[in-house]
Amino acid sequence: MAKNSVRSTALEERVSLSRDGWAPWLIQMLARYSLVFLSLLLLIVFSLLTPSFASMLTLQAILASKSKIALLALAATIVMIVGKIDLNVGFGVVLWHILAVTFQVWYKIPWFPACLLVLLIAAAYGLVNGILVSLADIDSFVATLGSGTVVYALALWHSGGRQIVGDIPEAFLRLHHTEVRGIPIAAFYALIAAAAIWVVTENTPVGRCMYAVGGNPEAAGLNGIRVNRYVIASFVASSLLTGFVGILIAAEQGVGQASVGMDFMLPALVGAFLGSTTIRPGRVNVWGTVAGVAVLAIGIAGIQQFGGAFWVEPLFNGSTLLLSITLAGYAQRRRIAGLKTVHRGAWRPESEACRKDGGREAAPPSGS
């Protein structure tokens, strides 16, 4: 059975306003939507301190630069739901964007088939990572760190460490440089991806089984869930989304170079970890990830407008990662402690929850 790098839970303690009173309900709402409130607070503070911050130009800059990070954070979220970590949200995009350019410049492949070929290779790479983690039973952090380093080396070898420049079709460049009513199209990509992943993970048996695998793979296997299948599929889906981001980076830059991509990894992982502290605290979730990326985007944009030094952004990302991991662990421990107090009769096997009503009222038996 594959080992878990990130523990996930499919169960949630609920507080009712009518049953528990307004104080517990208010505390839970503040905890659940803390990052949403923090985003709004940061917007207000930066807008008051720097009037130019509250402008369409700032919004466009944030959406254009951070939408790709949001997509990579969502890719990381898919794997984290099944209790794993995929570092290739940083390593992978280096090779994928280089291939998207070289297929068109060196091998004269039309842009659309070139993009499909990149996605196919990315999916195959995700399949390899999934097999390493689930069947070879290698810890996901170690497996993706090793395979990611190999992929990065291939990117350096393939590009020769130089920029790859050539004629890129305008239609390909429009994949990133198009705006819809003044909003960069990359923001719509992120919104569509978030909505699609949310529908699958929160409203289908597939998603509920993914959470069951992340919560306790041994118990999920004993209840008939094919753990390895869900782990492998999660890595493939994550790598596909990462491949798409690589294509977007190629369309944005118009060139291929191995120095582009690695700086996306840390903020993407920060957004995913930070997201597990909000909306559904203690549980990796899609909209929490979006809120986490929003806090990072607004915070960094505000600091930069105040003239922050070049080292401020990595310092902000690293500090937030440590804080988010701490808060996520605390929220998860509180949830597990609360679930253990729920009456035995309210619990049923997670495999049943996968097949029936989603287990939203489910809780484990006391002392389990």
Image (cartoon, rainbow, N blue to C red):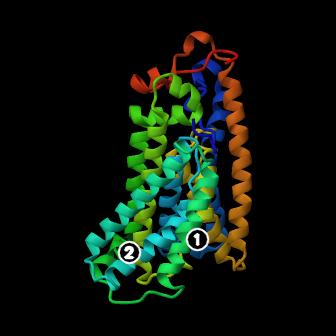
**Label annotation for residue 352:** none
**Is 93 located above or below residue 174 in the figure?**
above
Q: Secondary structure at mark 1?
A: helix
**Label annotation for residue 100:** 2
Residue ID at (51%, 80%)? 157
Viewer-side residue, 152 vs 332: 152
Task: Give the percent coordinates (x, y) of residue 86.
Answer: 56, 54
Label 1 vs label 2: CA separation?
A: 17 Å
**Is 262 located above or below residue 351 in the figure?**
below
Tell me if I can see residue 59 in this picture. no
Direction from residue 241 to residue 172 in the image, left or right: left
**Is 94 located above or below residue 355 in the figure?**
below
Q: Quadrant of the N terminus?
A: top right
Label 1 crowding class (10 Å Cα cut-off): few <14, some 14-19, many 20+?
some
Q: Amino acid at mark 1?
A: Met
Q: Amino acid at mark 2?
A: Ala
**Which residue is label 1 attached to?**
262
Task: Give the percent coordinates (x, y) of residue 363.
Answer: 58, 21
Residue ID at (65%, 75%)? 304
Dot 1 and dot 2 residues touching (CB under 8 Å): no
Viewer-side residue, 283 vs 164: 164
Residue sitting farthest toward the front: 136
Task: Give the percent coordinates (x, y) of residue 242.
Answer: 46, 61
Q: Quadrant of the C terminus?
A: top right
